[in-house]
Amino acid sequence: MKIAILGGTGSIGKGLALRWSGKHEVVVCSRELDKAMKTADECYTLLSDKGRFCTGISGSMNEMGIKYVDVVVLSVPYQGIVPLLKNLTPYFNDQIVISLVVPMKKNRWFEYTPPKQGSAALEIQDILPKSVKVVSAYHNVPARKLANLDIALDYDVVVCGDNDDAKRAVIELTREISNLRPLDGGRLASSYMIESLTPFLINLAIRNCLSDLGVKFV
Ligand SMILES: NC(=O)c1ccc[n+]([C@@H]2O[C@H](COP(=O)([O-])OP(=O)(O)OC[C@H]3O[C@@H](n4cnc5c(N)ncnc54)[C@H](OP(=O)(O)O)[C@@H]3O)[C@@H](O)[C@H]2O)c1
C-alpha cells in the first residue's frame, strides 16, 4: 500500500511511519518540504541502523503527498485539522482516511471538546468528499512507545468506520504492527467514545504518576 501521513513529522505520525515503512511505501507529509524530507531521512537512518528492511519512505508537501496514495493518515492537532483539510480537499479522491485526531483542551485537567457533529471523525467526514472513506483509530496509542522500535507494545486499537472494506484494511494495517490488537468498534458514530478516552487517559496518568497509558480489553 502507499500511505501518506499528514503530520508525519510529529510525535505519533513518525511512529506510524517507522512501523509501516517495512512493508508499505510511506510518504511523510508536512507543510514544509524540508521538514518532511528530514523526518523521512531520520526514519530511514533509524531503520537501517537497526538492520530493519524499509520498503520506501519519502518526504513531501501535504498537497502532493496525498494525491496518489491508498491511505491518508491524519495525525495533526485538532486545532489545525479543519483549515488544513479545507485547503487539501481538491487533492482527495477515494482514499481511505484514518483519523487519529482528538479534540481536547486543557483547563486544570484535559477535557474532550467535540465539535457539533459529535466527534472529530464525523466532522472530518463532513469536510471531505463523499468518495473518501473515513476510519477512526489509534487515538489511545501513546506516541513515545510507538516510535520506539525496541519497546514491545501491548495495546488494543479500536477501529470505527462506516465502510467495511476500509475498516478491514485499517484492521489489517494495525495487525501488522507487532502486539497491537485491532478491535472492530462499529460505525464512525462510535468514534466519540474512543476519542474521549484520550484526555481521560492523560489525566489518569498525571494523577497517578504513570506514563504511556493505553487501552487493553480483557
Ligand atoms: N501524541 C500522542 O501520543 C497521540 C496519540 C494518539 C492520537 N494523537 C492525536 O494525533 C494527532 C497528532 O498528535 P501529535 O502529538 O503527533 O501532534 P504534534 O506532534 O503536535 O503535531 C503533529 C504534526 O502536525 C502538524 N501541525 C501542527 N499544527 C498544525 C496546524 N495548525 N495545521 C496543520 N498542521 C499542523 C505539524 O506538522 P508540519 O509542521 O510538519 O506540517 C506537526 O509536526 C492529534 O490530533 C492527537 O490528538 C496523539
Image: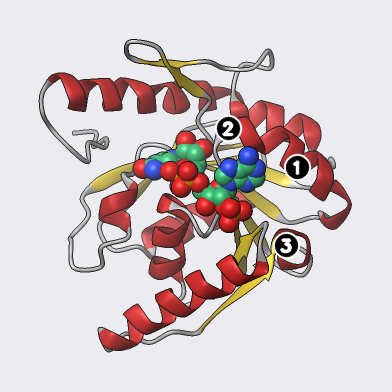
215 displayed left or right of 12: left
Q: Which mark is residue 66?
A: 3
- Vertical placement of 203 versus 164: above or below? above
Residue for badge 2: 78
State the image coordinates of residue 39 (x, y, percent, origin top left): 49, 70
Type of amino acid under label 2: Tyr
Q: Secondary structure at mark 3?
A: loop
Number of marks in the rendered image: 3
In the rendered image, is residue 151 in sight? Answer: yes
Type of amino acid under label 1: Leu
Residue at point 64% right, 56% down?
A: 72
120 displayed left or right of 43: right
Q: Nearer the viewer, residue 173 or 6?
A: 6
For marks 2 and 3, give the one nearer the viewer.
Answer: 2
Q: Ligand 1 within 8 A of label 2's CB?
A: yes
- 10 Å neighbourhood of mark 1: few (<14), some, or many (≥20)? some
Of pointers 1 and 2, the one earlier in the residue sequence: 2
- Vertical placement of 37 versus 138: above or below? below
- Vertical placement of 123 versus 91: above or below? above
The answer to whether mark 1 and mark 3 are in CB contact below 8 A is no
The quarter of the displayed image where residue 188 is located: top right
120 displayed left or right of 91: left
Q: Which mark is residue 85?
A: 1
Q: Which mark is residue 126?
A: none
State the image coordinates of residue 25 (x, y, percent, origin top left): 57, 77
State the image coordinates of residue 11 (x, y, percent, origin top left): 41, 52
In the rendered image, is residue 157 in sight? Answer: no
Type of amino acid under label 3: Ile
- Residue positioned most to the left: 209
Q: Secondary structure at mark 1?
A: helix
The quarter of the displayed image where residue 196 is located: top left
* Picture colour scheme: secondary structure
